Image: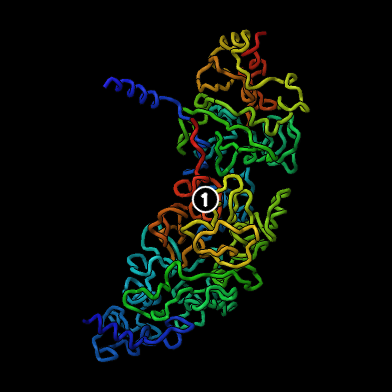
Amino acid sequence: MKRFILAALVAFAWGGTAQAGVYHYQKYLYCYDCHTMHASMSHGFNGGTVGTTAQLGGNWLPNPGSPVPALLKGQGSDLCLGCHNNTTFAPDVSDGAAGAQLPRSAGAFPATAGGGGHALNGSSPPGGAMPTGQNTLQCTSCHIQHGYASYRNLGSRSDANVTPTMSFDTTKNYDGATDVILPGYDATVGYIPVLGGDFGGYYKMDKPRYQALTVNNVTLTNRMNNFCGQCHGTFHGAPGDATTVGGEDATAAFPGETGFQAGAYAEFLRHPTAGVYIGQVSIHGHSTPPGVNATTGAVNASFYSITNRVKAAITNGAPASWTAGYGTGFVVGERATPMCISCHNAHGSTKPFGLRFLVGNGTETDLENGGGKYRNLCGQCHSQGAKTLETYPAAFAPPVPLP
Amino acid sequence: MKQRPLLFAAVALAATAPSAARPGDWHQAETLACSDCHTMHDSSSGAAMRYDGSADAARFLLRNATSVLLCLACHDGTKNAPNVLQSVSGPPAGWFTRTAVDAIGSTAHPLGQPSPVSVPQGSGAMTLTCTSCHDPHGSPNYRNLREKPSGLDGPPPPPVRANQLVTANGTNASQVYVPGNVTYVSGMSTWCLDCHDRYDPTDPTQRDQLSAHPFDRTLSQSPSIWATWGATPANPRVRVQNPAGVATPPDAADQVFCLSCHQPHGNANPAGTVYPDGVSSTSACVQCHAM
């Protein structure tokens, strides 16, 4: 009965359909979720009780309720984790049970040994530096706590680039202009807090569909990459930029070789995060395009055909030769480009550096972290070696043992 | 019940029989670790990832400036990997001298040259690196030898097969990469011919095979050679290939092959020629030819 009343209260408080924006934004920005005027509450906003743990409606105050700067109910990211750590009403970002949200598109901050990801309270982002004015990494380093017209309220704190707004749309399947598409979004559930934490699948791994755009003069990128590059700048750049990812025209890197798609790059200094298609350099085992093996007749075990696939930015305009070999999740004629979050969960994972070790095909019970090894992640796109021997098609199994 | 002794015997035989060398014992299948050689961002929590300590990111995301230097980062005797620079345990393939690695040398395959080098008794020119012969991502061949080392069009040579008593587990290089552990079975000579193609006896336009030393020739086919080979002291014998997989010569299936006279990585002698007595190649010749 209490649960029903609470649910009704939630429906009343947060009723309505979510618009362009997410929670903590515009009409879903509730001051009292995070702030307390006097560090004192003797009763709830509707006369009810006040708890010492975070709950819907703002009727809570941490125990002890000593004042915190900025009138906050908690210190730094601990305040955010009050709701976003193993509750039934807000997206969970920590290790542990996340119920219906699994697998989460951003993973979780690691609590287990061997896990990795963004280190809250850290101050040394690899490949870059903290933005001006930011001393340590907090949830609010990436998410604008008062809302932003951007996917997930993501927004840069850097003075140099304050508007890497990631556009998103919940009504389209593909438009070639929006950073993030949320196909099948359930407006009746919305992004708002909901008991049970389903959120219409909004926070699930398979929901957001990133698109490859031209952003800041980098073709085939997504503003998510640019966003990551605000702190990890050395790791992100356009192909050919010797200060970041490097690389050169594939025809120069492999003289005498043919068969590259136009604009293909190779010899990177750091792994590209944009500007290249998966399958664009198909020789030397770099990556395999969709299609059928001319010799065996088998479907190429490419990124486009495997079942358990990492995220990538999608665009139309695949070469005419790419007419077969697409698995679920791709439409013939589409192709993909790698992103930072192809390999890394933004929050983290149980694997080092927040990586996802997906084995590709076969049974994978932990899609959020992957149950394989490092090489399985690489093997999503790169066909070198026999790292996929357990699960990939027979044509890619290791050679028959010698007699 | 009567079959039990046979079964036990079969099991015992299997337990003691040399194992067929996996298609490359390392850098292959379960032991192919991308991060051994590659780094995605040249950063580990901000620290450089190259084995030489340089902060400069390298091409192909390698963890050293070149592929040769990358291989040598582990295979130079400083780590628990086969040492290709020094002849401490007499590795079957011989060893490179620093000179042979860094400049054209006459005692080994010259690696890392700035421009292609003509292949002796070959119709092409190549810039050799370790990965010219060994596939760093594994291959079906013994020692991960490339399926088509010349890179030219055409079918690959037959598989290179060898047996080993002990296979690599990442900690036992001194047991694995010694001559007594390896029995070459087939394919090695024709693999060499993929680049040294002027030795190809099937190509009438190329050098007459009779003007060069034969290879893959069974020693027992010649009574005089067989008699000499049989009388050769057990140590140090030159290596032979044995299609029957018999490890200990003399055996009727023993064959002379390229590695009978040459060590592909090289040694202290011209063309990596084997000097069993440490003095001259004659001591190799007389193991088969009575003089």
Residue B47 visible in image: no
Pinpoint residue B175: horizontal percent, then vertical percent. Answer: 47, 30
Disc 1 residue type? Ser
List x then y, in percent, for residue A290.
Answer: 58, 56
Crowd band around label 1 with a 10 angstrom C-alpha radius: few (<14), some (14–19), many (20+): some
Residue bearing mark 1: B35
Work out which quarter of the rendered image holds the C terminus of chain B and state it.
top right
Judge whether B169 appears above or below A200 on screen. above
In front of the other: B223 or B35: B223
How far across and how far down the image is residue A294, in percent? 61, 48
Please give left or right for residue A35 compared with residue B201 in the image.
left
Q: Secondary structure at mark 1?
A: helix
- In the picture shown, does residue B268 fall above or below A263? above
Q: Which chain letter matches label 1?
A: B
Q: Quadrant of residue A33?
A: bottom left
Q: Work out whether residue A82 or residue A210 is closer to the camera in this orientation and state it.
A: A210
Report the number of discs.
1
Query: Please, which colouring scheme is shown?
Result: rainbow
**In the foreground, B66 or A334:** A334
Query: Does any portion of residue A318 appear in the rendered image?
Result: yes
**Image height of B50 relative to A331, above or below:** above
For the N terminus of chain B, the image quarter is top left
Point out residue B104 in the picture as x, y percentages from the top left corner: 72, 36
Which residue is at the front of the view, B184 or A143? B184
Q: Which residue appears at 40% of the width and 75% of the height?
A: A200
Give the quarter of the image for residue B152: top right
Q: Residue at x 51, y 39 (%)?
A: A399
Q: Residue lying farthest right?
A: B205
